[in-house]
Image: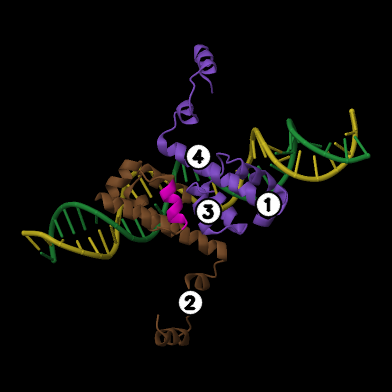
Chain colours: A brown, B purple, C yellow, D green
Amino acid sequence: MDQNKKDRLEGAGWRVGTAEDFLELTREEAAFVELKLALAHFLRDVRVRQGWTQAQTAKRLGSSQSRFAKMEAADASVSLDLLVKSLLGLGATREQVGQVIARAA
Amino acid sequence: MDQNKKDRLEGAGWRVGTAEDFLELTREEAAFVELKLALAHFLRDVRVRQGWTQAQTAKRLGSSQSRFAKMEAADASVSLDLLVKSLLGLGATREQVGQVIARAA
DNA sequence: GTACTATATGTCCGATCCGACATAGTCGTC
DNA sequence: GACGACTATGTCGGATCGGACATATAGTAC
C-alpha cells in the first residue's frame, strides 16, 4: 500500500497496518491463522493440480462441497484437524504438511 | 521382536505387527496419530526444558493440569488445534512446529 | 507408613466443529 | 441473457472437544 492511500484511509478513521495490528491479534493468534492459511492454500494446490472440482474432492474425503470450500478459505469453522486429515487423505505426506507449516511451501 | 516370540504370540491367537496393522489404521490415520504424538512429545520437551510442572504450564495457557496431561499423552480428546495453539502459546515458532511435524524434531 | 508433590485418568456440560442442505455468487458458452 | 458447471456463504442438528473437578497412581522424603 502506498503512503497516499494509507493517509487517506487513516484520515477517514481507518487504522491501517497488518492483519495482526488491525484485528489486534496476539503473536500466537497471528501465527495460528497464517499456519491455517498456508495449509488451506496447499489444499487448493493439491486439488487443482489434480484437476478436480471441490465437489469431487469433497466426496473423495467423505465431506461436502460447502465444507471443502470453507477448508480452502481457511474459514474459522474449520479446524486444523480437518485441514491436516484432508491433506493426508488426498495423499500428502507428513513431511509435506510439516514443510508447508514451516513456510518452505 | 524376534521370530520366536512372534511365532508364539501368533500361535496364541494374536496378530503381530505394527500399530498400524494391529489397529487396522489406514495410512493417513497412522500418519495423523504419529503427527499428534510428535507434537505431544515436543510439548513435553518444551515444558520440561523450562523446568515447569504441568499445572504451572496449564495455568499459563489458561487450561487445567488434567487437560495438559492429556495433551502430552496425545489423548484422543485433544485436537491438533489445541496442541498447536499450546505450543505457540509457550513460545514455539511456526517453523519449529512445522519441523516437528515433518519429523526433523 | 504417612505426607506431600507431580502426573494420569474418568466424567460432565457448555462450546465448537462438521456434514448436509439451501442458496447465492461467478464465469463461460451458446 | 439464459443456461450450466463451479465455487462461496449461511444455517442447522448431531458429534466432538475443552476446561474443570474429582480421584487415582507414581515418586520422594521423612
User: Which chain's residue wears label 3?
Assistant: B
Tell me what residue is drawn at x 43 percent, y 84 percent: A6
Q: Main secondary structure of the magenta part?
A: helix
On residue B14, which mark appears? Answer: none
Is B44 left, or right, of B39 in this rendering? right
What kind of residue is marked 1?
Arg
C-alpha span from label 4 to label 2: 39 Å
| Residue B85 placement (x, y as % from top left) | 56, 55
Mark 1 neighbour class, 10 Å CA radius: few under 14, some 14 to 19, many 20 or more: few
User: Which chain's residue wears label 4?
Assistant: B
User: Which chain's residue wears label 2?
Assistant: A
Is A88 left, or right, of C27 in this rendering? right
**Are the numbered discs 4 and 3 placed on the same chain, yes or no?**
yes
**Rendered image quadrant of residue B27:** top left
Say whether marks 2 and 3 touch (CB < 8 Å).
no
C-alpha span from label 4 to label 3: 15 Å
Q: Closer to the camera: disc 1 or disc 4? A: 1
Does the stretch in magenta take in A97?
yes
Tell me what residue is drawn at x 49 percent, y 53 percent: B98
Secondary structure beneath dot 4 equals helix
Does the stretch in magenta take in B45?
no
On residue B97, which mark appears? Answer: 3
Secondary structure beneath dot 1 equals helix
Tell me what residue is drawn at x 32 percent, y 55 percent: A45
Secondary structure beneath dot 2 equals loop
* Viewer-proximal residue among A45 and A66: A45
Mark 4 neighbour class, 10 Å CA radius: few under 14, some 14 to 19, many 20 or more: some
Secondary structure beneath dot 3 equals helix
Question: Disc 4 marks which residue?
Answer: B33
Q: Closer to the camera: disc 1 or disc 2? A: 1
Question: Of marks 4 and 3, which one's residue comes earlier in the chain?
Answer: 4
Against C17, is A23 above or below?
below
